[in-house]
Image (spheres, rainbow, N blue to C red):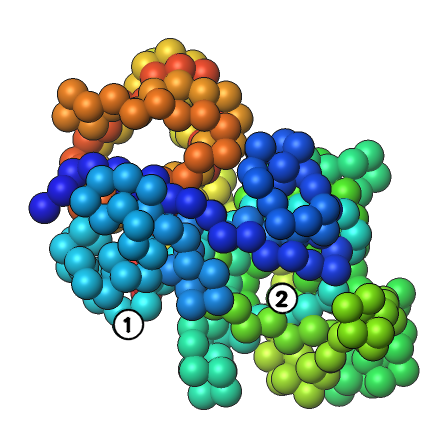
Amino acid sequence: MSNEPLFLEPYFQEKIWGGDRLHTEYGYQIPSDHTGECWAISAHTHGPAIVENGPYKGLTLTEVWDKHREVFGNAKGDVFPLLTKILDAKADLSVQVHPDDAYAKEHEGELGKTECWYVLAADKGAQMYYGHHAKTREELAEMIENKQWDKLLRKISVKAGDFLYVPAGTIHAIGKGIMVLETQQSSDTTYRLYDFDRIDKATGKKRELHLKRSIDVTNVPHVDPKLDIQTTVTGDKKITRFVDTDFFAVYKWEIAGSATFERQQAPYTLVSVLDGNGQLEVESRTYELKKGMHFILPYAVKSWTLAGKMMLIASEPGKKA
């Protein structure tokens, strides 16, 4: 079993709301200046990442999961459970909501979509759509039918370094001028509730809405999830645990020097380098790291050392993954 980290070549998605900051901020070769999403660690069929090194070089992450499950500690499940993205919102995303596992399995044949965002950048005054003001499902449906968006939708201001947890059933949209690192269940099911009456230049039409299913799956009333964010400092590393849920645990690692990590219970770890540069050392082998790189530490890696000055976001599968 190889103990070599899996470095990944992302898959890019063009979006009506996308921009060019995935190139200007991270140096990616993007397909156009309206590229909205970097699917950085993905085994989803709509955008699988490709392994760049080692014995699985050239395979998609999907193929590694399907054919070499030992890499992931023989983890169970039909699909690789997590998906890491970077999103660049040059304009507001559509207001949307995602189903939970039960609804998604019945209606879409895939996982539900609980997700979370670490805010990488936000223009002054930038806002997210997060939650709503309806007290009952009937009121929610009535406000949607009457297009009372200003009354229905809740907005919150955000800045770089903020973290938001977005359980399935939460109405939400990333706002204009915001970039996020998103950790989510591996699902591409989105129910679009409102799209600001935009015309898609590619089709000359408004994009499809999914009102009935949006109303079906929305949590009513909206309640902000309670987070227990914890930060510990040990030597040259500062670790912030944002969430530890049934679906995933998400951490921020800040390195200023050299720091060694020991694998705990999770069978594998997803890592994104979001600022700075340095080195990763695994059993006397050293790998150069720079901003914009993404990799998986497989089951065979029991300890590793990070050196340099870097900020990284790491995630691990939860109990339901």
Q: Please, what is the three-letter code of the amino acid marked with disc 1?
A: Asp
Residue drawn at x 69%, y 82% as measured from the top left: 210
- Judge from the rendering whether residue 95 lies leftward or rightward of residue 45; answer left or right: right
Q: What x and y, as percent, mark residue 95? A: 73, 66
Say which of 79 and 8 sits in front.
8
Farthest residue, direction left: 1
Q: What x and y, as percent, mark residue 114? A: 50, 63
Residue indicated by mark 2: 170
Determine contact: label 1, label 2, CB under 8 Å. no
Residue indicated by mark 1: 78
Label 1 or label 2, whichever lies nearer to me, is: 1
Residue drawn at x 48%, y 66% as measured from the top left: 46
Q: Which mark is residue 65?
A: none
- Judge from the rendering whether residue 254 lies leftward or rightward of residue 7; answer left or right: right
Residue drawn at x 39%, y 25% as measured from the top left: 289
User: Where 110 falls versus 257 (above or below)?
Assistant: below
